[in-house]
Each structure stands twice: as C-alpha cells, then as structure tokens.
Amino acid sequence: MDWPGLMRLGMGQLGLLPEAFWRLTPVELMLLLGADTSAAPITRARLEELRGAYPDTERER
C-alpha cells in the first residue's frame, strides 16, 4: 500500500483529520475519493470455479 500517497489524498485532498483517516477502511477511502467500487459480488458458480482451480490442500512438511 502507498500509505504516504493515501495519506496525502485523505488528509490533504479530502481534509480528513488523522484520526478520521485511520478509522476508514480502504474501501471507504476509495468511495470518498470517488472511485467506482461497484464490482459485482462473486456468484456461487464463480466461487466453485475458483475452488476447483485453487484447491485448499495440505502442504507436505
């Protein structure tokens, strides 16, 4: 994460106090900055596709 850049945007551009800046989640900060965070939620079919491609497995020690 580019914390110095995000701090410049949050506290400099938006005028947030440091306490308010550090209470925000990254998504909340992006919303305040006008970013489009409307990505569609993952569907069950896509989740199953990802689980098949990247199964949880035990690593050998």
Image: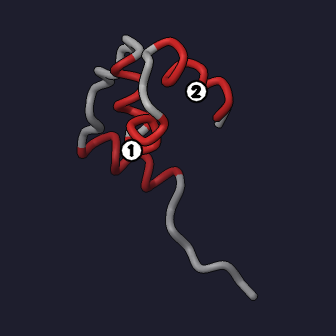
Residue 6 vs residue 31: left or right? right
Q: SS class of the residue under badge 2?
A: helix
Q: Amino acid at mark 1?
A: Arg
User: Which residue appears at 27% of the width and 26% of the height?
Assistant: 40
Residue 54 vs residue 42: left or right? right
User: Which residue appears at 34% of the width and 50% of the height?
Assistant: 48
User: Which residue appears at 25% of the width and 39% of the height?
Assistant: 43
Q: Which mark is residue 23?
A: 1
Structural crowding at the residue carrying mark 1, measured as other residues with C-alpha within 10 Å and reported as few (<14), some (14–19) or many (≥20): few
52 over 20 or under it: above or below: below
Residue 51 appears in which quarter of the rendering? bottom left
Q: Quadrant of the N terminus?
A: top right
Q: Amino acid at mark 2?
A: Leu
Relative to the observer, which residue lies in front, 42 or 6? 6
Q: SS class of the residue under badge 1?
A: helix
Reading the chain from its start, which is encountered first: label 2 or label 1?
Answer: 2
Q: Which mark is residue 6?
A: 2
16 over 51 or under it: above or below: above
Q: Outermost residue toward the bottom?
A: 61
Cα separation between marks 2 and 1? 13 Å
Structural crowding at the residue carrying mark 2, measured as other residues with C-alpha within 10 Å and reported as few (<14), some (14–19) or many (≥20): some
Q: Outermost residue toward the right?
A: 61
Residue 31 appears in which quarter of the rendering? top left
User: Which residue appears at 38% of the width and 32% of the height?
Assistant: 27
